[in-house]
Amino acid sequence: MRSEVAAPEAAPEPTAERRARGNRESGAWYPRWYWPSFATPAILWLALLFVLPFYVVLAIAFGTVDIFQNPLPVYQPWYWSFATFNQTLTRFVGTNPFYKPALIRTLVYVPAASLSCLVLGYVVAYFVARHGGRLKGLYLVLLISPFFISYLMRIYAWQSLLLTDGVINRFLIKLHLTSAPVNWLSGRPVTVVLGLVYGYIPYMILPLYGQLDRIDQSLLESGRDLGASPARTFLRVTLPLSRQAILAGLVIVSLPMFGDYFTNNLIGGVKTSMYGNLIDNAVASPGGGPQAGSLVLILVVLLLIPLAYYLRSTKRATEAGL
């Protein structure tokens, strides 16, 4: 009796070969440089407006100051001095780390504000994508409209709302939630976090909406046909399919929050100063140019960690065809 041996499963075809095969089957052929060439203008633009200014930051961080205490960049790397950079590092981890509290507050405020943006933004984006109907365009206009107003002006509006005789305090007293006005502008962490949420939540809603609106409705119907409850369908279908948009939104809102200083300057105080305030204070102080440049470089290194994770996750999702 002849035994049947199962044929080994074929290894998955690499993405590049799969695309090449698709081009051959469709009768179209493109050289390897064809699609990357479309990115050339953007690469040149970034090289002009990012790489060169970043090199200037390096030249200032490792440079010196003139007799008027103005930053004096040193563009020759062999003349760079790392004394100011090392001194700045010791203010985070040295014997007198008086920069450390601001860093810790930033590492607490930014995740809290980013997660708040995610929860609130996901609800709004889900509603617009699934239940917006003919009013989707109107909802999107309303979501984008805050961008037409300066962020500084919007925070000034928050100042008026948070005054001791402002609308929020009068509302709380009327509902008997507090017996006396709350001084929200006295350096309260919750005020700074809510200010960050207010300023950056539109950046979270837009990528979430774009992803949720593209999810095939038949996938959700299939989950319900298989007996899954609405909550289970959301957890097993909708949420995993929106994972890349969630990561993109978190990156978009959290990276600028790390360097934000307007929010704390206007509705916070010294007790709630963040990393961006350290840079702002260094820039404003005489001879603080190299120190400000060093703080920027340290912040860039810190932000490369979540950015690298996002790029790695995006690459895996692209290779998987998601």
Image (spheres, grey):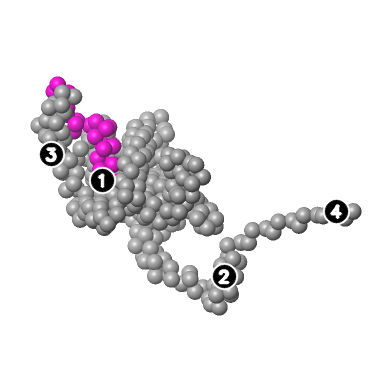
Task: Look at the numbered disc 1 and give the secondary structure of its residue.
Answer: helix
Residue found at x 12% / y 27%:
174
In magenta, the rendered stretch is 178-201
In the depicted structure, whether residue 155 falls above or below residue 320: above
Front residue of 184/62: it is 184
In primary-sequence order, the first of circles 1 and 3 is 3
Task: Look at the numbered disc 2 and give the secondary structure of its residue.
Answer: helix
In the depicted structure, whether residue 74 falls above or below residue 90: below
Label 4 sits on what residue type?
Ser
In primary-sequence order, the first of circles 3 and 4 is 4
- Mark 3 and mark 4 in contact? Answer it, CB < 8 Å: no
In primary-sequence order, the first of circles 4 and 2 is 4
C-alpha distance separating marks 3 and 2: 60 Å
Q: Is residue 270 magenta?
A: no
Label 3 sits on what residue type?
Ser
In primary-sequence order, the first of circles 1 and 2 is 2
Q: Which residue is mark 4?
A: 3
Label 1 sits on what residue type?
Gly
Res 218 quadrant in image: bottom left
Q: Which residue is mark 2?
A: 22
Q: Which residue is mark 1?
A: 199
Q: Which residue is mark 3?
A: 160
C-alpha distance separating marks 1 and 2: 45 Å
**Could you say where residue 137 lies in the image, as x and y percent from the top left?**
26, 58
Q: Is residue 191 magenta?
A: yes
Local crowd at mark 1 within 10 Å, few (<14), some, or many (≥20)? many
Q: Residue furthest right?
A: 1
